[in-house]
């Protein structure tokens, strides 16, 4: 069972990214991926945001294949209500935060507030991480340190030049997990598994822009044991998602 | 036929190293026929010596390995270093690294070097996507001054795992027909496909950046790209042959 823990469905004309679920699903099939966690490219600002509506429509059409994370602008006044609706009523399974996109400090009050609320639902929080300010692993670690009860996932494992910083943060903070998406180093996946354990590394593709079949190849080139590879490719994210509750 | 347009040989100041024997062994396992090798920046910071050592290392493998002369434009003898690289050591391209040699890609200090490249009809590789020194539009400024010199932006002209460097890279490609990209580590593999669609496959070259990037993984960006076989052949080897004057 392979579950891709990080993919996108959305259509954003301004960026030229048109990725309805019908673009993603054939790529999942080609890669032998059973299910995928999807999230929009846009940050929702309230409970009835079109980005979340687009996400929910995709899941309604492909409920056996797609699992959703709400993506929010934590600085928006409606963010907390949107999170409650998404996790409590809409059946979504996690929260995606892209602090560069909404220009917020990861350890800022509004972001931390959402992280703590997500923890009440036992829902994971997936942060974009990378080489740019507002998304540096060191900054995300500060947020994770403020919310030890929250399961925090660093997408892209720190990007191009901050993979080791991401691994170090996860080594220091037991609530931090790393996803393998988009960053280009099979060796860093192996190092992460060896350093923080195979239970805390998640396969994610960042598809459909990043090709899921290629992203799986990256995990396979890491040379993990079959048991560890199975954890990374699906068992870990399944364990996390199975714990999500939809009432407080 | 596969040609890797950017690998490194020697010993780098940062501890990374690669030998010709080791490189060729990996290339054999991946069915990569030829490669263009660039010197690492050695601990001595002496690029003239690094070019000479590179020439010596590739000479026994001249049917498979070609070399690029690396030059630091800050050095008073930069022009002589390039001339020696091309005329004495038989190197076939100019490699510039604004990040490690600490200069801006649009610096006028590069003009004497580009003049030599133009006179010798050799392509110029420039390590691109590095903040402050070699973002795509900084490279564009250089390329606009030298319209008859083929310039290859490494890494698709971007090191940004949010995709925020893509628009600038496209703008640079659109405005400078003598600008090319290599494929190493490019965020969102569909950027490669879109570049082929928008500007033609002749503007894209497979370059792995090994050993900083994993050659086993990087070759798959080209092999798995959703392009027709003619485009794949151009990216995989044809464009490299054309730019370096290699005949099949």
Image: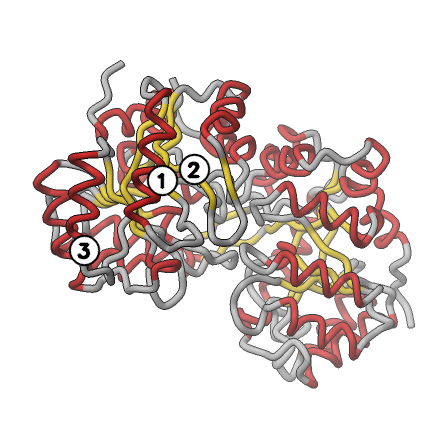
Residues marked 3 and 1, same chain: yes
Q: Chain of mark 2?
A: B
Q: Residues within 10 Å of mark 1 (few under 14, many from 20)?
A: many
Image mark count: 3
SS under mark 2: strand
Task: Give the image quarter of residue A134.
Answer: bottom right
Residues marked 1 and 2, same chain: yes
How far is disc 3 from disc 1 in space, using C-alphas?
19 Å
Q: Is residue B158 above or below residue A22?
A: below
Question: Earlier along the polypeptide chain: callout 2 or callout 3?
Answer: 2
**Which residue has dot 2 on it?**
B9
**Which residue has dot 3 on it?**
B77
Q: In this view of the protein, can residue A89 be seen by the observer?
A: no
Quarter of the image with the C terminus of chain A in it: bottom right
Q: Which mark is residue B38?
A: 1
Question: Looking at the image, which residue is at 59% across and 71% down?
Answer: A99
Task: Give the image quarter of residue B191.
Answer: top left
Q: Chain of mark 3?
A: B
């Amino acid at each position: 069972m392979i579950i891709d823990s990080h993919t996108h469905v959305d259509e954003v004309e301004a960026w030229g990214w048109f990725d309805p679920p019908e673009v993603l699903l054939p790529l999942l099939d080609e890669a032998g991926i059973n299910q995928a966690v999807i999230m929009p490219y846009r940050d929702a600002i309230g409970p009835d945001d079109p980005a979340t509506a687009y996400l929910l429509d995709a899941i309604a059409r492909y409920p056996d294949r797609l699992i959703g994370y709400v993506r929010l602008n934590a600085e928006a006044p409606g963010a907390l209500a949107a999170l409650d609706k998404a996790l409590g009523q809409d059946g979504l399974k996690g929260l995606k935060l892209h602090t560069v996109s909404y220009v917020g400090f990861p350890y800022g009050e509004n972001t931390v507030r959402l992280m703590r609320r997500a923890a009440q639902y036992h829902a994971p929080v997936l942060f974009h991480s990378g080489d740019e300010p507002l998304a540096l692993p060191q900054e995300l670690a500060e947020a994770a340190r403020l919310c030890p009860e929250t399961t925090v996932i660093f997408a892209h494992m720190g990007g191009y030049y901050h993979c080791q910083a991401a691994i170090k943060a996860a080594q220091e903070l037991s609530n931090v997990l790393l996803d393998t998406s988009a960053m280009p180093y099979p060796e860093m996946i192996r190092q992460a598994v060896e350093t923080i354990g195979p239970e805390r590394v998640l396969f994610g593709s960042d598809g459909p822009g990043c090709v899921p079949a290629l992203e799986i190849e990256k995990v396979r080139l890491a040379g993990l044991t079959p048991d560890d590879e199975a954890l990374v490719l699906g068992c870990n994210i399944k364990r996390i998602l199975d714990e999500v509750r939809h009432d407080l | 036929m596969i040609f890797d347009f950017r690998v490194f040989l020697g010993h780098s100041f940062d501890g990374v190293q690669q030998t010709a024997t080791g490189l060729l062994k990996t290339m054999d396992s991946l069915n990569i026929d030829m490669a263009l090798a660039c010197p690492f920046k050695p601990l001595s910071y002496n690029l003239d010596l690094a070019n000479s050592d590179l020439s010596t290392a590739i000479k026994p493998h001249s049917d498979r390995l070609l070399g690029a002369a690396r030059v630091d434009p800050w050095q008073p003898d930069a022009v002589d270093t390039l001339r020696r690289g091309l005329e004495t050591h038989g190197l076939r391209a100019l490699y510039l690294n604004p990040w490690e040699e600490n200069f801006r890609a649009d610096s006028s200090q590069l003009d004497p070097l580009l003049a030599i490249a133009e006179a010798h009809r050799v392509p110029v590789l420039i390590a691109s996507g590095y903040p402050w020194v070699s973002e795509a539009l900084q490279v564009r400024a250089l390329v606009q001054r030298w319209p008859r010199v083929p310039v290859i932006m490494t890494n698709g002209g971007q090191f940004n795992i949010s995709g925020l460097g893509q628009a600038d890279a496209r703008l640079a490609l659109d405005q400078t027909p003598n600008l090319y990209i290599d494929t190493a580590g490019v965020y969102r593999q569909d950027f490669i496909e879109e570049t082929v669609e928008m500007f033609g496959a002749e503007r894209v070259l497979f370059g792995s950046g090994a050993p900083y990037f994993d050659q086993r993984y990087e070759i798959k960006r080209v092999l798995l790209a959703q392009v027709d076989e003619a485009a794949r052949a151009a990216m995989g080897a044809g464009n490299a042959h054309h730019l370096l004057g290699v005949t099949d």
